[in-house]
Structure formats: structure tokens, C-alpha cells
């Protein structure tokens, strides 16, 4: 039976150190963490938005067995396009959802042989995938994720303690899961790592930076990637007069000292005036200061890099 409602499943992957960040991003984007490398949702997200989404499958058919799927796939009109079929693991349902190499190839051939067209394994015009989930088989067309954030590593200005592009991109997704109508700000933007990721996803965001050299670096990086129109102002965040829907703040720090408590509280108080929703990235425990500034922590995770630990706090 053809699936009448829009349903997608996403293939996810992350390292152990980034597992918490992936889950928090998934909760923000989909309202669900997924499990076993597969996430089912009615929410449509470009897989290129996330460093943890490998591909998206838009469900076309479902069936009780593989033969049912193959029979329905035979009716797909390819119009001369080449195609490829992928068997996708779903480890959440155990042995019934995870396939060994030979089993995958056999199932792919079973479905592919029923389709009217030319199979192409390397660079097909269209790619289809199938998996077991919810006691049935789901089949649909794949959209692959493009690792745009990797190209952002090659920026003219760099800073040793800046967020990685992967972490920055996930933090932007956590802060702004739906971009339409949202005005965002990074009031401590540094060299613009968060700004570049947000702009590459079409998010309306501006930056502010108190350090003149860092602000110049942010503008240079934005221009390098084609986002030179993005506004980056020089000044203290406590002087911001405008109001935004969301702020993303990577709390300032260095390896030799931490921000004094009074300055920390002043920053958080300023953030409260700037936006009602703020995502903080911090290497310190700021829970009590967050509460004192009038925020509640709605969600959180930690991101490890060896012994270096960052916390991501979603506050409202």
C-alpha cells in the first residue's frame, strides 16, 4: 500500500564523544533522539544541515515483507535515470534489523532486479533505500547529506579555542531548528565560526564582538565563504539594544583563567535582555548563574574532546 502521509527516516551516526550532542540536536530538530542509527519522523530536514545525518529516506511504500516492497518498486517510473538500491540497518530492533554484507547485497538485488531501469553502483541518478522499522519494511528515495561544514575548516582566520565546525553546526541546529521568521544573534562571535554555519543554512543571524581583531577575523571568514553581507558589530554585548528570538553564546575562556563571577553574571543578565531563548556553550558549571539571571535550563548535553569537556545548555 502506498504511504499517504509524509514520513521520513534518517540514518544517523556519531562518535562516542559526540553522542550527547547528536541526541540533543535530534531532540531539537525532530523531538526524538532516534535509536540504533535510524530515526523516523514526519519532520523534513535537509540531511546536509547536520553533521550527524548521513541520509534521509522519504517513504514511498511499506510492506509486510521484502517481496511486497519489490513488487511496488517495479512500478517506479525512472524515465531513463540510472538507480541504486541500499539496504539500511536499524540496530534498534536487533538481529531483524541489522544485516550482514552478503544479506544486504542479496536483498538489494532482489528489489533492484524488479525495477525497470539501469542499475549504477557508483554515481546513480537516483538512490533508493529500504529498512525494517515498526514491524514492517519501509522503502523510499534517498537524499544524501553533504558535509558542507568540512569546507568551513579551510578559513583564513583561525583560533585555537574556537568551536569545531561540527560542534558549531550542531549548536546552531539546537538553537534554531526552524529558521523561518527567526532572528538570531551571536553576541560573542569571535572569529565567526557559528555565524558561518548559521549563514550556510540560510539563518538570519548577526554577530557582535568586543575584540577588534576577532571581529575583523569574523568579517574576513564570512566574506571568504560568500557571506560578507552578514553584520558583525564591534562592542560589548551589554550595549545591545535590539531584541532577538534566540542567542548563541560560547562563553569566553582561556586555558589560564576563567571569567570572574561578576562578569559572568553580567553576561548572562545581558543575554536575558537580548533574547528569551539562549543556547550557552561553556567549559564551566554556570547552572547557578543561569538561574540567577532568570533562565531555566530546558535541555543540555556535554561534548568531550579527550579530557576537555564542553556543556551545551538550552535556556529559556
Image (spheres, grey):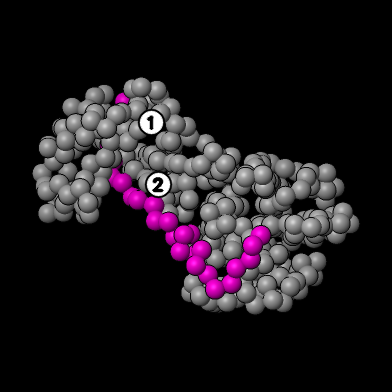
Q: How many numbered markers are drawn? A: 2
Residue 1 visible in the displayed image: no
Residue 290 visible in the displayed image: yes
**Front residue of this view, candidates 159 and 240:** 159
Q: Is residue 82 above or below residue 18?
A: below
**Front residue of this view, candidates 96 and 231:** 96
Assess disc 2: are there few (<14), some (14-19) or many (≥20) residues with their C-alpha within 10 Å of its C-alpha.
some
Query: At 11% across and 48% down in the image, what residue appears?
Result: 118
The N terminus lies in which quarter of the figure? Answer: top left
**Front residue of this view, candidates 29 and 50:** 50
Magenta stretch: give its range. Answer: 136-161
Question: Which mark is drawn over residue 54?
Answer: 2
Assess disc 1: are there few (<14), some (14-19) or many (≥20) residues with their C-alpha within 10 Å of its C-alpha.
many
Q: Position of residue 110 (x, y in %)?
A: 16, 32
The first of marks 2 and 1 along the sequence is 2
Query: At 22% across and 54% down in the image, what residue appears?
Result: 123
Q: Position of residue 101 (x, y in %)?
A: 27, 32
Q: Secondary structure at mark 1?
A: loop
Residue that carries the numbered disc 1 in the rendered image: 90
Residue 186 falls in image quadrant:
bottom right
Question: Which mark is drawn over residue 17?
Answer: none
Query: At 66% across and 66% down in the image, what residue appears?
Result: 189
Residue 234 falls in image quadrant:
bottom right
Q: Secondary structure at mark 2?
A: strand
Q: Position of residue 77 (x, y in %)?
A: 15, 47
Indicate left or right for 303 with 296 as reference: left
Amino acid at each position: 500500500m502506498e504511504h499517504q502521509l509524509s514520513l521520513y527516516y534518517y540514518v544517523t551516526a556519531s562518535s562516542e564523544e559526540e553522542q550527547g550532542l547528536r541526541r540533543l540536536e535530534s531532540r531539537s530538530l525532530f523531538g526524538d533522539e532516534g535509536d540504533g542509527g535510524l530515526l523516523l519522523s514526519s519532520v523534513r530536514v535537509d540531511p546536509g544541515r547536520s553533521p550527524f545525518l548521513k541520509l534521509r529516506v522519504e517513504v514511498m511504500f511499506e510492506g509486510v515483507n521484502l517481496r511486497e516492497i519489490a513488487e511496488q518498486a517495479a512500478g517506479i517510473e525512472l524515465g531513463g535515470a540510472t538507480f541504486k538500491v541500499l539496504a539500511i540497518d536499524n540496530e534498534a530492533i536487533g538481529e531483524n534489523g541489522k544485516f550482514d554484507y552478503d544479506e544486504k547485497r542479496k536483498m538489494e538485488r532482489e528489489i533492484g532486479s524488479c525495477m525497470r531501469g539501469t542499475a549504477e553502483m557508483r554515481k546513480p541518478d537516483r538512490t533508493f533505500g529500504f529498512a525494517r522499522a515498526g514491524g514492517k519494511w519501509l522503502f523510499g528515495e534517498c537524499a544524501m547529506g553533504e558535509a558542507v561544514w568540512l569546507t568551513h575548516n579551510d578559513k583564513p582566520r583561525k583560533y585555537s579555542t574556537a568551536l569545531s565546525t561540527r560542534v558549531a553546526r550542531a549548536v546552531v541546529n539546537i538553537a534554531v531548528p526552524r529558521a523561518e521568521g527567526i532572528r538570531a544573534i551571536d553576541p560573542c562571535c569571535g572569529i565567526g565560526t557559528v555565524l558561518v554555519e548559521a549563514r550556510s543554512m540560510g539563518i538570519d543571524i548577526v554577530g557582535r564582538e568586543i575584540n577588534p581583531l576577532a571581529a575583523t577575523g569574523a568579517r574576513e571568514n564570512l566574506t571568504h565563504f560568500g557571506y560578507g553581507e552578514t553584520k558583525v558589530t564591534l562592542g560589548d554585548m551589554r550595549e545591545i539594544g535590539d531584541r532577538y528570538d534566540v542567542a548563541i553564546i560560547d562563553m569566553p575562556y582561556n586555558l589560564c583563567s576563567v571569567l570572574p563571577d561578576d562578569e559572568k553574571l553580567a553576561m548572562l543578565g545581558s543575554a536575558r535582555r537580548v533574547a528569551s531563548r539562549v543556547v550557552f556553550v561553556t567549559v564551566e558549571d554556570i547552572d547557578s548563574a543561569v538561574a540567577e539571571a532568570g533562565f531555566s535550563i530546558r535541555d543540555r548535553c556535554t561534548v568531550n574532546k579527550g579530557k576537555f569537556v564542553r556543556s551545551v545548555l538550552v535556556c529559556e
